[in-house]
Amino acid sequence: MQLTGNTILITGGGSGIGASLAERFANEGNKVIICGRRENALAEAARRIPGLVTHAVDLAERAGREELSRWIREQHPETNVLINNAGVQNWMDISDDDFAERADQELAINVQAPVHLSHLMLKHPALTTIINVSSGLAFVPLVRVPVYCATKAFLHSFTLSLRELCRARNVEVIELIPPALNTDLGGKGLHDFAPPVAGFIDAVFEQLAQGKLAATYGFTEAMNNAGQEVFAPIFQRMNHPQDAKR
């Protein structure tokens, strides 16, 4: 994709990877629109990033996604890039009383929203690029976030199919595959051990400039190209570290 001169819609753009992508794309000479549920996060991002456009919406609701599509068509019809970044990560056990309720939340934001928004935005004549943000956990699950991992595996698979389905339309479909990064995903402090987002953003933009359709960072490069001979020992280390040390 071209890295400048776009009008870009980023879901979940108020914090984490979405906010960092918004800032970098704005600095590269793009018009950037972010949306999300938390108006305070949107306002803080707008204060930090000159020219940023914000729109409050609940992407967990079908009506919210449809309203967002109408608003883009009416107010920003030149929007040519959709970045499906919004995500929810719940640390939970299947025996938790609220497991099903929290799983529904993850499925709505992490699966239904990007699928529905991709469908809606493909009806906009200006659209040239869809970018889906998956995860290294799409390949090897961390069992403490079981539904999140499954949703990212879905998004990875959906992205591969969507790329082929959009080829005849001349719409490029790109996947960003981050590892764990130092964000508040899942809750404050849970990812303090992880590398900063800035390194991932730098790597993503370098790979986008090279025309890559899957942008990886650190160990997710190996995971994106690997088979079970790589996945199995990583699963063991992630989920049974006490046995892996033996």
Image (cartoon, rainbow, N blue to C red):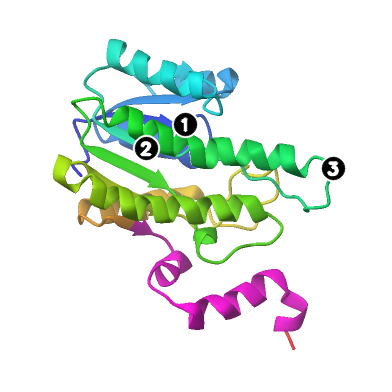
Q: Along the line of sight, which residue is nearer the eye, 190 or 138?
A: 138
- The x and y percentages for residue 116 are 42, 33
* Mark 1 residue element: loop
3D distance between C-alphas at marks 3 and 2: 33 Å
What residue would you read off at disc 2? 83
- Report the mark closest to the observer, 3 or 1: 3
Left or right: 206, with 180 as reference point:
left
Q: Residue at x 65, y 75 (%)?
A: 237
Give the amino acid type for the residue marked by disc 3 in the picture. Answer: Asp
What residue would you read off at disc 3? 97
* Mark 2 residue element: strand
Q: Residues within 10 Å of mark 1 (few under 14, many from 20)?
A: many
Measured along the vertical axis of the image, is residue 112 above or below residue 236? above
Left or right: 182, with 7 as reference point:
right
| Mark number displayed over residue 13 | 1
How many labels, in total? 3
Left or right: 129, with 183 as reference point:
left
Say whether residue 64 is magenta. Answer: no
- The x and y percentages for residue 29 are 24, 31
- What is the span of residues highlighted in magenta in the rendered image? 215-244
Say whether residue 225 is magenta. Answer: yes
Q: Residues within 10 Å of mark 2 (few under 14, many from 20)?
A: many
Measured along the vertical axis of the image, is residue 246 above or below residue 192? below
Q: Earlier in the sequence, mark 3 or mark 2?
A: 2
Q: Residue at x 39, y 45 (%)?
A: 132
- Report the mark closest to the observer, 3 or 2: 3
